Image (tube, rainbow, N blue to C red):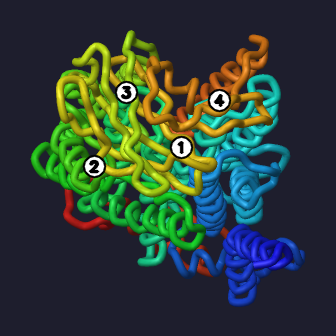
Amino acid sequence: MTTSGVLAVSANIVADQWLYVVFLLVVYAVVSLVLLVVGDPGEETNKFRMAVHRVSSALETGTGYPGWAMAGVLSGLVMLGMAALGLYWDVAWHIDLGRDVQLFTPSHTMIVIGLGGLTFAAAVTVVFATVARADVGFRLSGLHVPWSALSLASLGLGGLVAFPIDALWHEFYGIDVTLWSPSHLMLVGGGSLATISVWLMFAEARHQAQPKWLGKLIQITVAGALLVGMSAFQGEFDFGVPQFQLLYWPLLVVLAAGFALVTTRLALGGGGALATVAMFLFLRTIFSLVVSGALNHTFPRFPLYIVAALAVEASAAVLGTRRPLRFAVGAGLAVSTLGLAAEVLFADASGWFSTTSALLPKIALLAPVAAVAAAVLGAGLARSFTDKKVSRGAMAGAGVALLATLVYPQPRNVGPVDAVIRLQPVGDRALVEVALTPPDAAERAAGFAVVAWQGGGRVSAELNKVGEGRYVSSKPLPITGSWKTMVGLFRGDQVMAAPVYLPADPAFGAPAIPALAERQTSFVRNTKLFLRETKPGPAWPAIVGYSGLSGVTAVWIGLFVLAVVRMEKQRESASDAPPTLGASPIGRASAAAAGRQSWRLAGAGDGPEIYSR
């Protein structure tokens, strides 16, 4: 193919990729126009208020939820979908191809639009609530501001603040390819935790709602999105290039399951945890297939959570949910044992990775603490949907316990291990033989394998023992071109790697490490090989980065707590008043009926249905 032909093909590929950026926005615009056409204008004369009223009435008629809440929920879902797809696409790009050649790639643009769109979704919620004169949140210069919208806006703004901090970080420390730098955690945290705010919109609107099947389906979609959001922090494990202790994976799995499944089981009632996992699997499968199929990148794996959901449902059946703290403790323990065991077996059987016996003692100690703590926090969040409360002391203790379990695996040290690495060529690849000194260095390892990445994909192979201290890879690994191939060794708090082949990187002055028939080398901290683009820099950018992460996280948590507490007080003060659905025709028609008939989510009891009266 000629150079012009290659450029033409590349241009077509780039153009096709940008279609993913605009697709959800086009769908959002089309649906908005349809709602504008079919909605009831009511008695409004102002054109803007009339347009809002039309969309609001159509949403209320179709879902049974107040228009302000559903406008915020659907806007938030679209923006979260863009941010999530952009995140998994961007991580896959870096794993397969390395650095970006430009800042505004399609995946970066999707993340920016998605995070900025969270603030837009919050603004939409405020506008619709103000036009409807909704009795929610607080008043600010004539605006009706729902508490859930306030927290959603803070998450979008916090995520956007991460972009200049990320640019500052890269300027002083180089380009890093890790999901867990402070600026990246702000980005991921803003999008992931925003699912909580969208979920809270249902809680804030529930005393005004008479849910229809479409409204219930949308709420289950948000429940699934909540589990997707809580699972986003597992990204480096999903793509098989972890740069931290492998102990994090089981802890993050039970954290996500304990928090999201207990929350949704209490809010949705019987079957709520299973419905959440079903929607989670649907959403994550779509993301993974788009990334790996349509975009031709590495497939991002994910936990199944099916057994964890069954464990939560069984805990509710045995313990009941009338005492949410007892239920949360029981569900957390079930998730950290039965649920986690199933995920470990699935990961091993699917070839994702194996959890060795060396990790089991620490998993047995820390996973129940993490799962129970997350479940208690989930039960605390669910108090927005039910009349059953978890004490603030229990929630504070759970928060401290959860933080402690996440800090414990933080150290990344290096042990005195040397290796002789020999290559047995197989075409343009090679089997990798590793002889360790001391010979028993990998006997109690949490992980020991070879991985190659950034050569157009990712390839990994187990190291099978063939003699005393001698191991051979289960398949050939690439050792040419732009591939970066290395041996990884995880044991205790030691996170190490030894090079097999690394190409030269003139842009950063990094020399090549050629593929030799035999090389003697020492294991180093794995980030020395994974993050060769990084460079030393002054301390103050790190202070800014970590202070920014700590600051916005504290604000986010504070606004969540404020939203839950204030929503609870508003619900109690309005418990004797008939609910109103705003100024739309459906609201006026159903107000009297809603006053005579109190609708609630079945999470307040133990009934078998997801929703009940």
Q: Residue at x 45, y 17 (%)?
A: 522
Tally the numbered discs: 4
Q: Quadrant of residue 141?
A: top right
Q: Quadrant of residue 163?
A: top right
Kindly identify which residue carries mark 1. 567
Question: In the structure shown, which secondary structural element does the residue marked by tag 1 occupy?
Answer: helix
Q: Disc 3 or disc 1, which is closer to the eye?
A: 3
Kindly identify which residue carries mark 3. 489
Question: In the structure shown, which secondary structural element does the residue marked by tag 3 occupy?
Answer: strand
Q: Do the CB atoms of the residues marked 1 and 2 lie less than 8 Å apart?
A: no
The answer to whether residue 561 is above or below residue 443 is below
Q: Do the CB atoms of the residues marked 3 and 1 lie less than 8 Å apart?
A: no
* Place of residue 491 in the rendered image (x, y in percent of width and height, measured from the top left): 32, 21
Q: Residue at x 31, y 39 (%)?
A: 254
Give the CA distance from mark 4 to mark 2: 29 Å
Q: Quadrant of the C terminus?
A: bottom left
Give the CA distance from mark 3 to mark 1: 49 Å
Asked whether, in this view, residue 435 is left or right of residue 478, the answer is: left
Kindly identify which residue carries mark 4. 532
Q: Disc 1 or disc 2, which is closer to the eye?
A: 2
Kindly identify which residue carries mark 2. 347
